[in-house]
Amino acid sequence: MASGMQEKQYTPSLLNFFVYNPTFGQKEGEEEKKILFYHPSDVEKNEKIRNVGLCEAIVQFTRTFCPTKPAKSLHTQKNRQFFFEPEDNFWIVMVVRNPMIEKPNKDGKPPTVEYQEEEIIDPLLTLITFLVLQLFNGTFGRQMEAGGVELLIQKLEKFFYRYLQTLHLQSCDLLDVFGGISFFPLDKMTYLKIQSFVNRVEESLSLIKYTAFLYNDQLIWSGLEQDDMRILYKYLTTSLFPRHSEPELAGRDSPLRPEVAGNLLHYGRFLTGPTNLKDPEAKFRFPKIFVSTEDGYEELHLIVYKAMSAAACFMISASVELTRDFCEQLDGLVGPQLTLLASDICEQFTVNRRISGPEKEPQFKFIYFNHMNLAEKSTIHMRKTASVCLTSVHPDLMKILGDINCDFARVDEDEEIIVKAMTDYWVVGKKSDQRELYVILNQKNANLIEVNEEVKRLCATQFNNIFFLD
Amino acid sequence: KVQLRTATYIRYKANSECQNNVSSPTLDKETEDAATDNDRSDSGEFVVTMLAKAKLEEQGIGVKGRSSPLLEVGTQETPAFISHRDEDVTAESWRQHRKHVFVLSEAGKPIYSRYGSEEALSSTMGVMMALVSFVQSGDNIIRSEHIVVFLQKGPLVLVCVSSSRQTEQQLRGELLYVYYQIISMLTQASISRIFEHKKNYDLRRLLAGSEKILDGLLNLLDSDPSFLLAAVHCLPLACSLRDSLSQILQKAITPNLVFSILIARNQLLTIVQEKTVIEDARLEPADVHLLLNLIGASSAFQAGEIWTPICLPLFNPDCYFYAYISYLDPPECTVCLLLLSTDKEAFYAVAECKRKIEEAMMAQNSLSLIAKVQSYSVSQVGVSDLRHFMYKPFDVPDNYRHEEEKMRLLDLYRYMHNRIHSTSRPLKLIYHVAERETLLAWVTSKFELYTCFSPLVTKACAITAITKLLRWIKKEEDRLFIRYPPKYSTTPNPSKSSRGGKSDQQDSTDNGFLSLL
């Protein structure tokens, strides 16, 4: 008799994550030395060695056919593994369980499990993981120089412990592939105000080398190199800001509310570094990041200072020791100004929204990305954080977007792909001169020509002079 | 002067599990080459493919001086084939092959390799085996610059290493074809039994000489889109000609004859099948592909008549049919007659059918009519912007004559096919504007169409072209496709009419030849 149970859907999940270097334990009996980090850590030692050994074997095997470009991934029915060698002989491997559907069986039999093969974005996650790792620790090579294997292992342990918690595989989609940055739209006046704020601070506190300004998880200004900013942005929006957002949302009497003890002049506070300036005994440190320069990299302190929804990042050379006095100076200088700016921006934003009308279902559902400035825009995502991805279209359509993106990535030339899905939705992808646009149209009875006209209209209004194909 | 290496002799004993009333063949042993005598090491029963040249002669089958068809390894091999076997597996050129295929047994024993000899590759194969056993069971894939696809079928493991940018489903499909071709020579039941009996049996002993057939299959898989579309290439014939040929075949029957097939230039002319025993079961396109490959791969078929056991894996993987193969127009050898019977002893009866067929065709002058038939070209369709299309038959226009371009075009079609038939997110239509061409693929419940245009074509033009094309195809339908294979009955009771033809069929949707029309 029917048990009334539903099908259960399991999203992809992280099974294993490890880092190894095959040159470290080449002698018989010393294989464990190869493993620099392994998650989950409670797995038996021999199994760890075996899994690492399998990866090595696969890489070796594929080298038989192409010595320069070995294996990238292994797909089995139940899971998939991704291999990434960011530096010579240092390997990062991620094992993900395939999404599956569990269908209940009658008569008390165990439920049947159906695994779903999918093309997913996961390979990028290993790259992004490495880049974030590199941001905070420098390259593997450098770490080895600095403290040898033991220190490296410690640092990896510390880093991944926190970072892996922020990996949410089920909410990854095309936007993650782009690794773009969401820019906050501003009017000229407010933008200038922010510019002059940044200039003032940099002049008063000459130690500051680079600054970045964000509002509401979106970027407004950055003095960093684009590639570095991209990763920093990812870290800020997926790790740091979410960790610190709860207290701000807490009610007035909530114990979570930060101590604003005595400082009623502004709402600014440090997100990294000293949590309580009033306490002279409290120790603090700023996280250090490594950004690239012309001839290598430089190490910087990362100061993230927030006031309401505005956040400013200040980067100072790591060779300088940052004292409590300095922090107080910064707090005094930046706090009031940032608070003011934050409320200005907020006001402007509200005014603009009132002008443009209430937010309704956008006319066109599209995703736009510009490879040159990393700007991304999506009218499909209603909410996208690290752990949640809410879109107004069916996930299968998002996957089709992913497929089209894959096809575009294969060649450098401009292309256009139009497909009609089984549900009669039309998906149009255009790639032109480093920009990509994906449009989803729900026009069941339209034909190719009509769809083409619709998209042309969209391009004419929003992307004038960008997409030239017929 | 034809120098023949000794073909492997085989002897087979009763195959008691076989259905379909195939009588147990018990040819006596006649070994010339003791080294290939499998018998001594194995006790018990096993079934193995037959090919004894002397045997044939002894029974008066076949023509003297000819070796057996299936495993002939004479010097009729082209030099290219020979060099593949001896290729240096450490050389860069070996690595650069577009697609490697390996077959090994579960125990890691090499069976076949497309490039390079199995001996030289035994260590690589050992690694592959280790990988397969290490990783969980099921089908596994490794992605790198190449894709490595593993497929395990029973005691055989097939591996493909490909840089052709095909998807794993497509590659797995190709490996499946290789597996089926091996089955077609040995049957699945016998392979299972052999390995059950002896896990590290060296299957090459039974397949010696068949590398050419597998090589041929792999080349076809690369270049012939009919595999991709799971459809059989039919020679476009005027309806009347095809009907007349079908009728000739229908009349020349004998008990236990199940399929009669006429092939010209590797394309199907007509196929008729027995009605009562087989009923509505049909030959899958894959079986037909395997048959066509078998016939095409070996030029030994070109002389005289061949009588050989063959298994049709999708029809029944555990049993043999007996195939009578003969070209009707030596020495050009473009038209081939294939008669399949379930009776091993029926050679003479079947040969008699062939003579009847030959006579009738002579009377109707069929051969010369067939010779005149041409595959049509795009220009016939009369659509100016259309460069190329694939709607079952494959047409090759000028810009794609060059081999590489052909391959590239086929790759493009494969990519579209994969997207359209994706298991998780299939599509109805793809319109892809790229640098060198514009592609349009369209699937409906009635057909599947892949077309290629110049890159500058406008959408309006493309749609018009497609409409014209579809109209033309509809008009020429009867000439281009075989929809309903006619039938006959070989049972003594002729009350079931063997008229065959269109009136017998209600539903064409599951027709193996036109998979989607």
Image: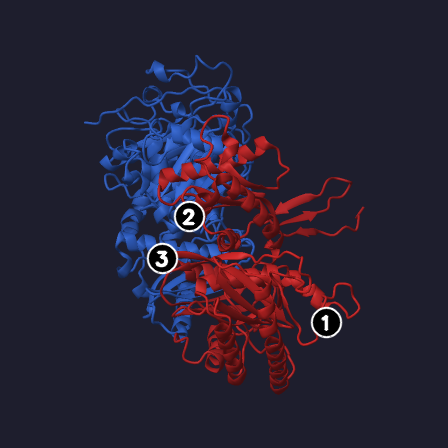
Chain colours: A red, B blue
Q: Chain of mark 2?
A: B
Residue at numbered disc 1: A262
Q: Residue at x 71, y 69 (%)?
A: A260
Report whether residue A278 is seen.
yes
Q: What is the three-letter code of the residue carrying label 1?
A: Gly
Give the x, y percent position of residue B463. Answer: 42, 72
Judging depth in this view, the residue of A20 and A51 nearest the camera is A20
Q: What is the three-letter code of the residue carrying label 3?
A: Asp
Residue at numbered disc 3: A295
Residue at numbered disc 2: B227
Q: Quadrant of residue A334?
A: bottom right
Q: Secondary structure at mark 3?
A: loop
Instruction: Mark 3 vs mark 1: give the one in front.
Output: 1
Quadrant, the N terminus of chain B = top left
Q: Residue at x 56, y 67 (%)?
A: A424
Q: What is the three-letter code of the residue carrying label 2?
A: Phe
Label 2 environment density (alpha carbons within 10 Å; few <14, some 14–19, many ≥20): many
Q: Is residue A211 left or right of residue A2?
A: left
Instruction: Mark 2 vs mark 3: give the one in front.
Output: 3
